[in-house]
Amino acid sequence: MPFVETAGLRYYRFEIFPPNLPQAIFTRKGGVSPSPWDTLNVGGTVGDEAAKVRENRVRSFSAVGRRLESMFDVWQVHSADFVLAQAPRQPDEGYRKADIILTDRPEVTLYMRFADCVPVLLFDPVKAVVGMVHAGWLGTVRGASRAGIEAMIAKYGSRPADILAAIGPSIGPDHYEVGVDVLEQVEQTFGTEAATLLETREGKIYLDLWAANCMQLQQIGIEHIEVSGLCTACHTDDWFSHRAEKGRTGRFGALIALPS
């Protein structure tokens, strides 16, 4: 089953990946943070206490058999820039700004935080490489998912046909209203295919981030893609949603690692 519950935590696991691959998209359940970050908030810049954020991260990593000290994370800036994680990020080591992280080191756990943007998890079982992409609308029009695959090809020799990709819970096309400025950038990036990603209802424009990232992955040759189809704005009982909760909310965590 996609959802797992353990030690009070509830998290989502993709079925496309092998059972021994550590990977999870954590819901907001099972942590120690008070409202409006209740309860498994792992975002350190939303007003929650640092000690509670750290405890939530410890609980998350422990639930899937990883140590918090194995974490490599970045300062997410809605880019298409990548970082290769050669070792866990040390507590006194500054954050690197990027929205794609890749590693071939089993001692490293890739970690990011979300509250409507799209988590894209990647695994190449042939070259033994994992990756994670953070793709909101801006990262999507900048081609973050495609850039993640391009980096796997260039840095690790991956073949697109071997890579497994998974698109996690994020704001769905039923809730993601955008303005004309976003529409224009989507049209610039996707050309004639943009029409399949945009829908106008009652004078409002809605963008399908799931389909947009699927399209970019398929265009570069990815054949195996799983889409969770879970809208964070529809299910705030499970997920933090910046849009649905008007900015007063936490961040849920996502991780992936090679088996150690």
Image (spheres, rainbow, N blue to C red):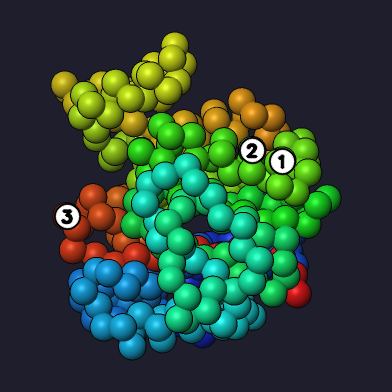
Q: Amino acid at mark 1?
A: Ile
For the question of whether residue 230 can be seen, the reply is no
In the rendered image, residue 166, in percent from the top left (x then y), is placed at: 59, 47
Whole-angstrom CA distance, mark 3 to mark 1, is 39 Å
Q: Nearer the viewer, mark 3 or mark 1?
A: 1
Viewer-side residue, 96 vs 176? 96
Q: Quarter of the image containing the C terminus?
A: bottom right
- Residue that carries the numbered disc 1 in the rendered image: 153
The image shows residue 99, relative to residue 54, as above or below, that is above
Residue at 25% x, 55% y: name it: 242
Residue at 26% x, 83% y: name it: 49
Q: State the SS at label 3.
A: loop
- Residue that carries the numbered disc 2 in the rendered image: 150
Instruction: Answer with mark 3 or mark 1, whichever residue precedes in sequence.
Output: 1
In the rendered image, residue 11, in percent from the top left (x then y), is placed at: 50, 68
The image shows residue 163, relative to residue 70, as above or below, that is above
- Residue that carries the numbered disc 3 in the rendered image: 246
